[in-house]
Image: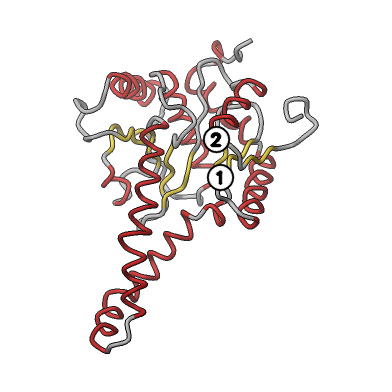
Amino acid sequence: MLAKGELDALVSPGNTGGTVTAAVIKLRPIRRGVGPVLPVWLPFSNGRVLLGDVGANHEPTVATLVSSSIMLATYFRESEQPGRPCKVGLLTIGEEDTKGNGTVHGARLKLNELKEGKGLACFVGSAEPYMLAEGKVTVAVCDGHTGNIVLKMLEVFLRDQILKPLSRAKALSNKASLAIANLFAGRLFTTLKGMKYNLNPDTTGGCLLLGVNGTVVVSHGTVGRDGILQAVNLAIRSHDRDIPKRLKEALDAYLGEESAKTEG
């Protein structure tokens, strides 16, 4: 129905792989060689960071990593506050040019070419995780397998190693424990609760699927009523801004319009 124009957008809390596959087949990629990308916002003290992919494409090629970088940079600019710098990095095991597998090396070389020849000034090179926390990278690009593990590890660590112990400490009744809890928990606890809010499927709604001809929001399988409402709101905002069109325009600007035909 979305492909036929009978719907403006689609929200799916179902199986991620099935939703992505159906969207790619029915809606078609916005450009030949473009792979689907699921981005999420990660909260850090220096501002949120856009991470993608987190599950749509587990084995990207050099071409799809390059197109993903351009789409994520464009989505960042469309979504983030004006004036916040867009700094794109390929997430890998080191910031040196020798780090990473062959696909990452190839993508870095191509993105450096676009930086020099096409003005892709936002590309900073390879990125380690610490660079996200320090604000040196505001858009982190990786394959869907790596991104999904990063996201889930962050969620588990936040819940089990920080929020639960802090909650138990604040619940203790003796004065010494309360003093210690208040000393360490005050501002830190508030900050971490904010991180939990930003990583909660019921407050974020879901991820906008980038790279297809249509507005599709993929929600977490555990999402509740509030999460569905947030996902619908995300779909409405994305449709109103015509994100797929803006992504295609950016790809054509950097990669050339001679390859702009979608697969048929």
Image quarter for residue 143? Answer: top left
In the orientation shown, which residue stands out farthest toward the bottom?
A: 175
Q: Position of residue 214 (x, y in %)?
A: 66, 30
Q: Are circles 2 and 1 on residues that touch, CB within 8 Å?
A: yes
> Marks 2 and 1, Cα distance to the nearest angstrom?
8 Å
Q: Residue at 48%, 60% (x, y): give it.
A: 197
Q: Residue at 46%, 28% (x, y): give it.
A: 68
What crowding class fits label 1: few (fewer than 14 Cα within 10 Å), some (14-19), or many (20 or more)? few
Image quadrant in which the C terminus is located: top right
N-terminal-most mark, 2 or 1: 2
What crowding class fits label 2: few (fewer than 14 Cα within 10 Å), some (14-19), or many (20 or more)? some
Query: What residue is shown with label 1?
Result: 221
Q: Position of residue 230 (x, y in %)?
A: 62, 53
Amino acid type, label 2: Thr
Q: Residue at 50%, 16% (x, y): give it.
A: 33
Q: From what the image shows, is residue 99 above or below residue 131?
A: above
**Mark on residue 16?**
2
Task: Give left or right: position of 170 versus 214.
Answer: left
